Amino acid sequence: MIGERPDKYKAIIFIGAPGCGKGTQGGILAAIPRFYHFSMGDAFRSMDTRTPIGQEFISYSRKGELVPDELTVRYFKTQVDARADLHMFKPDIDIMLLDGIPRSVDQAKLMEEHIEVLQLFHLSCPDREELITRIRKRALKEGRMDDASEEVIKKRIRTYEEETKELLAHYADRRTDINANQPPIKVTHDILGEILSHPEWQEFAREV
């Protein structure tokens, strides 16, 4: 039925170190019909702390405690459902491009109730110096001088690698490594090539 919400949202996950271009690629692909880009970072930044779920986040922050994965995933679900209700995201015909979630295997397992992961793209940046340069430029452009420090940048990259090692292994059967050191248009070309050859995408495309 047109407009009927599926039990699970079809999704493609983007994972990569800070500065690898996840947001850039998500934005490019979102301009193509049948893709919807969801950035968890943007969702957090726009959070209304006056709402009940916003107050839950505040309570953990005040105590200096980490936010439980269950709460993060619940917030993700409310945000996606709200976009579906507003017809910004049309889950019966759109594939969601996830950026910034899941961040751990525990989150990934909790999200299995809500999403069907078709593929995971690991935007790999083997040239660390290029990655550091990108992050520094972005930090300076946004006026975040503290984040422009090479020491801070290297620590962020190490933290990312430690946090995502198990996550990448968890999705090993659906994982594709993309060289993100290439020009953005070449990265987009490689991603689209993989998506177009994916059996489930071909089936999904025929249905819509």
Image: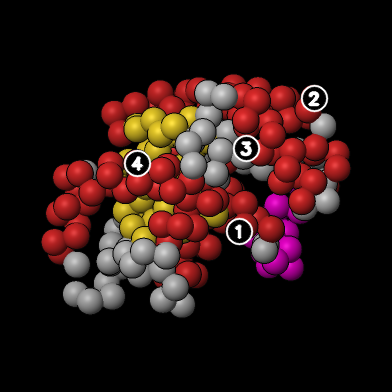
Identify the mark at residue 8; answer none if there is no mark: none
Q: Which segment is the magenta one?
A: 48-60
Residue 91 visible in the current orientation: no
Horizontal side of 65 relative to 92 (left or right) equals: right
Residue 102 screen position, x and y as percent: 50, 41
Residue type for callout 2 = Glu
Horizontal side of 199 relative to 28 (left or right) equals: left
Q: SS for tag 3?
A: loop
Q: Reading the chain from its start, which is encountered first: label 1 or label 4?
A: 1
Give neighbour class at mark 1: few <14, some 14-19, many 20+ (Cα, 10 Å): some
Q: Is residue 147 above or below residue 114?
A: above
Q: Which residue is mark 2?
A: 151
Residue 182 screen position, x and y as percent: 48, 36
Q: Nearer the viewer, mark 4 or mark 2?
A: 4
Q: Reading the chain from its start, which is encountered first: label 1 or label 3?
A: 3
Q: Which residue is mark 4?
A: 190
Gap in Å between the C-alphas at discs 2 and 1? 28 Å
Q: Reading the chain from its start, which is encountered first: label 4 or label 2?
A: 2
> Tags 2 and 1 in contact by the CB under 8 Å rule?
no
Q: Nearer the viewer, mark 1 or mark 3?
A: 3
Q: Which residue is mark 1?
A: 43
Magenta stretch secondary structure, dominant: helix
Give neighbour class at mark 3: few <14, some 14-19, many 20+ (Cα, 10 Å): some
Residue type for callout 1 = Ala
Q: Which residue is mark 3?
A: 18
Residue type for callout 4 = Asp
